[in-house]
Image (spheres, helix red, strand yellow):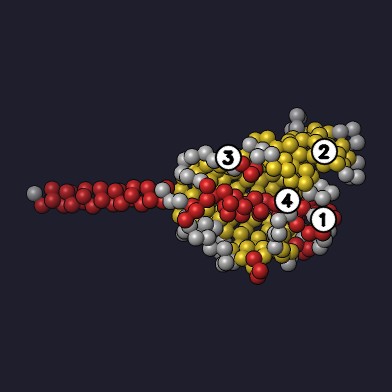
């Protein structure tokens, strides 16, 4: 009889715990992101890894494969952000873990405040050597997308309901002396919850499957399309991004000094932001 009592008590406790967990999950999934107070004033630091490779779009022959490690910091003075400890290495393929390569000291102290479209101007990158400007533009733009989706799109999301931001439909972005990119077909969905850095986070999946782009300058002529997809983990307490990953695939026809007869290239990129403090 005593054994049966113990079993009954144990069963009751387990049932109550499971019920409490379900209730807790339901609470998180019913959160309205617009009601979360963003914690933008604190300093957040991210380990960033960027990998990219250029391959023959048909045959798959690899031209190069590279990896960058960097530190990205938000919440600096005057709402600025910045980069430091940037290094570049050649790797075999995306499966290889990025290691420290050649240091790029020009990025140390590359701090800035985004003011509308100032990042599209060449003057914005004046401290970066010409051969590193494409990398700088990638890093800056990827960080803007990460923060922008968290700040301006997350508020519109409801769990398990697809969302298409109208302001990103046919949104044309033109960099001075670089690429013109037209954003189309951006879809987002809050698909679940996870825990990272002791923060309960919403898992936000996003994709954009067709975005025309072109480059036409003295160095090269490019016409192609980009598709990208990924996910972000956004804190349901402070609205900061705890983790983000994006994969991009760009098919493009390129004509340049290296490819005078025009070459069809597949540029593949993967970038990860992981908040460490």
Mark carried by residue 138: 4
Q: Earlier in the sequence, mark 2 or mark 1?
A: 1
Which circle, 3 or 2, is nearer the viewer? 3
Question: Tag 2, which secondary structure?
Answer: strand
CA distance separating discs 3 and 2 = 28 Å
- Is residue 92 visible from the viewing direction of this image? no
| Residue 207 appears left or right of 249 | left
Estimate how packed mark 1 is, as few (under 14), some (14 to 19) or many (20 or more) residues with alpha carbons within 10 Å: some
Which circle, 3 or 1, is nearer the viewer? 3
87 and 118: which is toward the camera: 118
Q: Is 143 above or below relative to 77?
A: above
Contact (Cβ within 8 Å) of mark 3 with mark 1: no
Q: Is 151 above or below relative to 261?
A: below
36 and 268: which is toward the camera: 36
Q: Is 56 above or below relative to 165?
A: above
Estimate how packed mark 3 is, as few (under 14), some (14 to 19) or many (20 or more) residues with alpha carbons within 10 Å: some
| Residue 140 appears left or right of 63 | left
Mark carried by residue 231: none
Return the residue at label 1: 122
Q: Earlier in the sequence, mark 3 or mark 1?
A: 1
Return the residue at label 2: 222
Which circle, 2 or 1, is nearer the viewer? 1
12 and 184: which is toward the camera: 184
CA distance separating discs 4 and 2 = 17 Å
CA distance separating discs 3 and 4 = 24 Å
| Residue 99 appears left or right of 180 | left
Mark carried by residue 164: 3
Residue 106: percent from left, percent from top: 78, 63
Q: Earlier in the sequence, mark 4 or mark 1?
A: 1
> Residue at image x 77%, y 46%?
174
Question: Tag 4, which secondary structure?
Answer: helix
């Amino acid at each position: 009889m005593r054994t049966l009592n113990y079993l009954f008590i144990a069963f009751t406790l387990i049932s109550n715990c499971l019920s409490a967990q379900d209730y807790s999950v339901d609470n998180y999934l019913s959160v309205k992101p617009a009601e979360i107070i963003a914690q933008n004033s604190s300093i957040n630091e991210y380990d960033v890894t960027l990998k990219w490779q250029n391959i023959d779009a048909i045959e798959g022959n690899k031209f190069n494969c590279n990896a960058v490690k960097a530190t990205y910091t938000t919440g600096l003075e005057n709402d600025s952000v910045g980069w430091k400890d940037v290094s570049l290495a050649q790797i075999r393929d995306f499966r290889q873990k990025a290691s420290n390569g050649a240091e790029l000291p020009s990025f140390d102290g590359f701090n800035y405040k985004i003011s509308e479209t100032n990042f599209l101007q060449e003057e914005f990158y004046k401290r970066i050597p010409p051969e590193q400007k494409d990398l700088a533009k990638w890093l800056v733009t990827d960080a803007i997308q990460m923060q922008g989706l968290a700040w301006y799109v997350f508020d519109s999301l409801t769990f398990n309901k697809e969302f298409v931001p109208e302001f990103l439909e046919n949104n044309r972005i033109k960099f001075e002396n670089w690429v013109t990119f037209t954003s189309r077909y951006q879809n987002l969905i809050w698909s679940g919850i996870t825990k990272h850095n002791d923060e309960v986070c919403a898992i936000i999946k996003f994709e954009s499957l067709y975005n025309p782009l072109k480059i036409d300058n003295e160095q090269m002529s490019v016409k192609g399309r980009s598709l990208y997809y990924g996910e972000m983990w956004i804190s349901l307490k402070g609205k900061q991004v705890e983790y983000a990953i994006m994969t991009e695939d760009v098919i493009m026809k390129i004509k340049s000094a290296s490819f005078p007869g025009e070459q069809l290239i597949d540029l593949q990129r993967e970038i990860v932001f992981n908040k460490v403090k």
